[in-house]
Image (cartoon, rainbow, N blue to C red):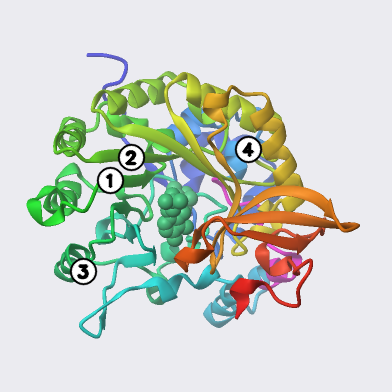
Amino acid sequence: MSKFDNYKIKYYNINNVSEIKELKNLPENDLESMKIVAKLLPFRVNNFVIENLIDWKKAPNDPIFKMTFPHRGLVRDKHYELLRSSSFNNEILNRIRSELNPHPSGQKSNVPMLEGKEVKGLQHKYDETVLLFPREGQTCHTYCTFCFRWPQFIGDKQLKFETDQTKAIYRYIKNSSQITDILFTGGDPLVMPAKKLRAYIEPFLSADFKHIKTIRIGSKALSYWPFRFISDEDTVALLKLFREVVKSGKHLAFMAHFNHWIELENEFVRKAIKNIQKTGAVIRSQSPILSNINDSSDVWSKMWRTQYQVGIVPYYMFVERDTGADHYFSVPLYKAYSIYCDSVNQLSGLCRTVRGPSMSATPGKLNVEGIKEINDKKVFVLKFLQARQREWVNKLVFAEYDEKATWLNDLRPAFENEFFFEE
Ligand SMILES: *Cc1c(COP(=O)(O)O)cnc(C)c1O
Ligand code: SF4
């Protein structure tokens, strides 16, 4: 027996939230608004987050608390009034949700076609990489209050990208030789039992899929449920699957989602990182930059430094998408850029491979590369890291400098009437 054994997951949602004893010290107001906000946004948190990540002396101002528990600041005043009013009903709820831009950046339009039918459960936006949404992986160990996929977790069937249409998926990928990367995403694919995950991954290791070089798994389990890689019932089977992927000659890229260095400071996550690395998988990290959570270079430099020290490769800093509680989390682009620069400046070259701040928008991934004066005009210099059309990759884009801009929609071309990608 070790200290890692017998830690069993327990979930809390708004129905059993009163069982969380740590909440007893919060003001009455906060508990009431928690219930009101939970009508609108998904809420689920597990015992590990409560017992190991949140510093309850700092709650409700603790960053991990703010990114997992519903709270007043997440909802605009006009919506909050509607949510708490006595005439509140489902129709009002749906209207509020529709006003929160529930499907940003044309995600629905990336679903590929096979023989005249949509291949549900896939998104194929960039030639080399396809996103796969396994049906059983569409929940998470804990929901993040800033998540851009929030509508998936509140039972909005129309908005869900989930599937068990596996035949069509495999046929489509088999016939698409330009695809090199499969990204398993969700939700969190690592809520699935190892057996299920194996059923999804194993076919890609066969000779039909020689063109697939990399299996990526996007997950927040390292941070929110490290026992997945230490002492869960099927941990051994999960790590064995990882080893097999590596042994088959493919790269296993574990895309870890960390938002704050706090998530890296416990012994469990450190042990889990080592266990994953021992399989030959490489862990990369990505996170959005979030107001009220990590909008300072101290947080990012410490997070990246720690990651690089334990062999995690910092990969992306994302700009928070224009959906859900974005008014609470969004950071102006100029500020995100300055935080990126100040953080990277403090780190060794090995860490400066990280890219950002990057917007995953409809035309592609646009990175803020600089702020510059050109012909007496202050501009944002942006660059396509990924693009819907291959010829746009690496192209520069010049937009008028605007301190209020938080997303591509807010930007105007600096020197033309229209951005070239807008036609
Ligand atoms: C970021 C992203 C990818 C992966 O892009 P890489 O630059 O290869 O990591 C794939 N699909 C979508 C929709 C993305 O936003
Ligand atoms: S773990 Fe990822 S998918 Fe799940 S709620 Fe958080 S950000 Fe969203």
27 or 72: nearer the viewer: 72
Residue under label 3: 172
382 or 183: nearer the viewer: 382
Per the image, label 4 sits on a secondary structure element best described as helix
> Residue 51, relative to residue 106: is it above or below?
above
Q: Position of residue 121 (x, y in %)?
A: 29, 67
Q: Position of residue 364 (x, y in %)?
A: 52, 63
Q: Identify the image quadrant of residue 152.
A: bottom left
- The alpha-carbon separation of the residues under discs 3 and 2 comes to 22 Å
Judge whether residue 80 is colored magenta: yes
User: Are circles 1 and 2 on residues that touch, CB within 8 Å?
Assistant: yes
Residue mark closest to the camera, 4 vs 3: 3
Highlighted range, magenta? 68-82
Q: Position of residue 374 (x, y in %)?
A: 83, 55
Residue under label 4: 63
- The alpha-carbon separation of the residues under discs 1 and 2 comes to 7 Å
Residue mark closest to the camera, 2 vs 4: 2
Which amino acid is tagged 4? Pro
Per the image, label 2 sits on a secondary structure element best described as strand
**Marks 1 and 3, the one that precedes in the sequence:** 3
Which amino acid is tagged 1? Thr
Question: What label sits on residue 253 in the rendered view?
Answer: 2
Residue under label 1: 214
Q: Identify the image quadrant of residue 275.
A: top left
User: Are circles 4 and 3 on residues that touch, CB within 8 Å?
Assistant: no
> Residue 37, relative to residue 159: is it above or below?
above
**Marks 2 and 4, the one that precedes in the sequence:** 4
Dot 4, how many residues are within 10 Å of its Cα: few (below 14), some (14-19), or many (20+)? some
247 or 132: nearer the viewer: 247
Residue 132 placement, left or right of 261: left
